[in-house]
Image (cartoon, rainbow, N blue to C red):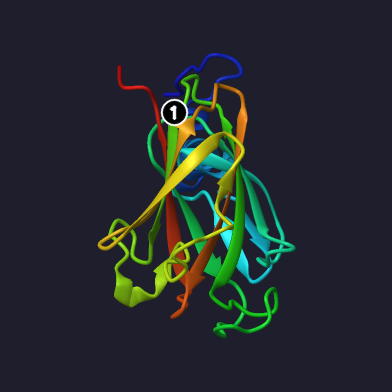
């Protein structure tokens, strides 16, 4: 006996074959994967090459906005940054050209780096001190044997200066730290820091921890 079907709705069209079912599911899977991947791709880490080095904000907490120079006294490495926090952040530095101690700046990573860092205080809090710390191994203090320091052999440095701080202290062993003090950086203001980094046994990668200090009282 023939079964009656509603006009225009044959029952066999309501049953999905495996191929048809996958064609229905795949667009949903694509949308799901895309939703998870796109946020990760929306804000890629930017690496800024200049001279014989590259500079990266990949460890988070701040943004590099430009990099220039080759690292000589006449043409220092100039890194411009924005800090959104009053907690320590870490700048990652890598050699991008061959390592040759005391070679020609800009053509090789020679272990002598005149630095200028311009930092915009975007943290909404005033900074009353600012400290830099060198590390050859992330999260481990730099020691004398690694050759990395803020020009440790020079007992009377004349290349350490800041636009906002009148004084500085250097601390060596077991750390290599440079603390700027006797000043202030208000929110939305920029401070400039000049110093010399020397590395007599240059490595491919090292780090500068930057620690803005806020009033404690």
Q: Nearer the viewer, residue 74 or 32?
A: 74
Residue drawn 39% across the image and 75% down it: 147
Q: Is residue 171 left or right of residue 61?
A: left
Q: Residue drawn 65% across and 66% down?
A: 71
- Residue at disc 1, secondary structure: loop
Which residue is disc 1 drawn over? 128
Choose top left, top right, bottom left or bottom right for residue 109.
bottom right
The residue shown at (51%, 64%) is 197
Horizontally, residue 27 falls left or right of residue 170, namely right
Q: Quadrant of the N terminus?
A: top left
At which x and y percent is residue 36?
47, 38
Q: Could you tell me if residue 26 is visible in this image?
A: no
Q: Is residue 72 visible?
A: yes
Q: Is residue 156 left or right of residue 139?
A: right
- Residue that appears at 60% across and 73% down: 96
Res 107 quadrant in image = bottom right
| Total labels drawn | 1
Residue nearest the viewer, comparing 135 with 23: 135
Q: Residue 124, how many percent across, how many down? A: 50, 19
* Spot occupied by residue 7 in the image (x, y as percentages of width and height): 59, 15
Looking at the image, the residue that sits furthest to the left is: 174
In the rendering, at what x and y percent does residue 54 appear?
Answer: 60, 63
| Relative vertical location of residue 205 with respect to residue 10 in this rendering, above or below | below
The quadrant in which residue 74 appears is: bottom right
The foreground one among 107 and 174 is: 174
Q: Is residue 166 above or below residue 101?
A: above
Label 1 environment density (alpha carbons within 10 Å; few <14, some 14–19, many ≥20): some
Image quadrant occupied by the C terminus: top left
Outermost residue toward the front in this view: 156
């Amino acid at each position: 006996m023939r079964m009656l079907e509603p006009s225009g709705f044959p029952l066999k069209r309501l049953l999905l074959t495996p191929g048809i079912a996958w064609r229905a599911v795949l667009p949903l899977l694509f949308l799901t994967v895309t939703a998870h991947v796109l946020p990760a791709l929306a804000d890629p880490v930017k690496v800024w090459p200049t001279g014989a080095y590259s500079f990266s904000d990949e460890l988070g907490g701040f943004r590099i906005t430009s990099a220039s120079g080759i690292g000589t006294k006449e043409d220092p490495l100039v890194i411009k940054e924005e800090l959104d926090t009053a907690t320590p952040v870490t700048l990652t530095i890598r050699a991008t050209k061959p390592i040759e101690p005391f070679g020609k700046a800009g053509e090789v990573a020679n272990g002598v780096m005149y630095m200028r860092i311009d930092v915009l205080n975007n943290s909404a809090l005033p900074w009353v001190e600012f400290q830099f710390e060198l590390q050859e191994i992330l999260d481990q203090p730099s020691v004398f044997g690694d050759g990395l320091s803020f020009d440790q052999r020079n007992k009377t440095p004349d290349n350490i200066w800041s636009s906002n701080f009148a004084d500085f202290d250097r601390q060596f062993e077991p750390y290599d730290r440079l603390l700027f003090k006797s000043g202030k950086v208000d929110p939305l203001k920029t401070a400039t820091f000049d110093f010399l980094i020397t590395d007599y046994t240059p490595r491919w990668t090292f780090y500068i921890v930057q620690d803005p200090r806020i009033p404690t009282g």
